[in-house]
Each structure stands twice: as C-alpha cells, then as structure tokens.
Amino acid sequence: MSTTAFPADALIAKYNRPGPRYTSYPPATQFSPDVPADKLLDEVRDGEGPLSLYLHLPFCESLCWFCGCHTITTTNRSRADVYLDDLEKELTLFTPLLKPARPAAQLHFGGGTPNFFTPAQLDRLGAMLRRHFTFEDKAECSVELDPRRLTREHVEAFARMGVRRASFGV
Ligand code: SF4
C-alpha cells in the first residue's frame, strides 16, 4: 500500500506570511491610483449584466479591540441621517450612468454595524435603493449584524428590504 505524505510543511511555508483581509474583492491592497477616473467611468457606462451592490454602513457604538474595519465610533444616530443624505446625492449622480436594463442581483450590507441604523433609517435606505435600482425577484440580500444590539424591529426592517441571510459578528 502506498502512502502520500500530507504536504503540511509546504502548506505552512506557503501561507505563513501576512496576507490581505479578503473582506472585499478586489482587496484594498489591489486598489491603484493608476486607474484614471475617466477609465473607471467608462467601465461603469459600458458594463453589462446584473449588479452586485455593497453598502458600507460605517458606524459602531463602541470599538472592538480587534477591529480592522473602516468605522466611526459614535452613539449619535443623526450621523446616519447625514450619511443617508449623502448617499442619496451619490446615487442620483451615479445611477444614471448605468445601463438602465441592469438589474441588481446581489445586495450586501456591511460596516461598521448595519444595525447601528434605526429601523426608520433602514426603511429610508430600503426605499432609496428601490428608487434607484431594479432588483431581480431572487436577488440575494444579506447583512452583517452586531448581535449585542440587534432588536426585533431591526430584523423586521431588514426583512422589509429583502434581506434573507445574516452573519453575526463583532
Ligand atoms: S462591531 Fe465590527 S465594525 Fe464595529 S467595532 Fe466591532 S469589529 Fe469593528
């Protein structure tokens, strides 16, 4: 009977080094100023097919000691209103550049802590997204949540936005 040695040493040698945190694709380490703005806009205008949307809701009530996310620590919920005002302006400028036939097939809320937003603010966000995008019937919608501050009203608000999958973490 032949045996094949498990290449543990090779695997350890291969992966025993710092790597990017794959919380987004492409990872931030691949962002480059060498891509000019007009090239980026061409990509946006010429793009085809379904959209995958990521909404970064960058607020937390307190900062976890291990946090590597882009977040703002505050208990002031009106910061989320200002964020939503700015997001509305950005969507008004940006979405007319997209081909109108492109549906949204995926939507993900990360952060920060998306349930930092009040249920009323989440309802406002959901209405805004429905005004600017057409979602496929079976669009995949998911959210990252801080279970320490999650209420039934939050769950119901995310459900109204079409969210069907949640991951919990702090
Ligand atoms: S809840 Fe998440 S994003 Fe907020 S401070 Fe903790 S690890 Fe960072």
Image (cartoon, grey):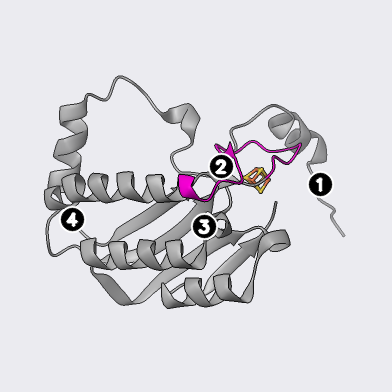
* Label 3 crowd (10 A; few <14 / some 14-19 / many >=20): many
Name the residue furthest right: 1
Q: In this view, does 51 lie to the left or right of 21?
A: left
Residue at (81, 50) in percent of width and height? 4
Left or right placement of residue 162 versus residue 114 in this view: left
How far apart marks 1 and 2 lie (CA) works out to 27 Å
Q: Are marks 1 and 3 in contact (CB under 8 Å)?
A: no
Q: Name the residue under label 4.
A: 48
Magenta part of the protein: which range?
62-79
Mark 1: give few (<14), some (14-19) or many (20+) Cα within 10 Å.
Answer: few
The picture places residue 60, in percent across and down from the top left corner, at 61, 46
Q: Nearer the viewer, mark 4 or mark 3?
A: 3
Amino acid type, callout 1:
Phe
* Viewer-closest of 13 and 170: 170
Quadrant the N terminus occupies = bottom right
Q: Nearer the viewer, mark 1 or mark 3?
A: 3
- How far apart marks 2 and 4 lie (CA) works out to 25 Å
Q: Which residue lies furthest to the top in this view?
A: 34
Would you name the residue on which mark 2 appears?
22
The relative height of residue 90 versus residue 116 in the rendered view (above or below) is above
Q: Which of marks 4 and 3 is nearer the N terminus?
A: 4
Marks 1 and 3 sit apart, C-alpha to C-alpha, by: 48 Å
Secondary structure at badge 2 equals loop
**In the rendered view, would you say 85 is above or below 29?**
below
Q: Which of the 4 quarters of the picture holds residue 66?
A: top right
* Residue 42 pos. (x, y %): 14, 38
Task: Kindly identify which numbered label has been placed on residue 129.
Answer: none
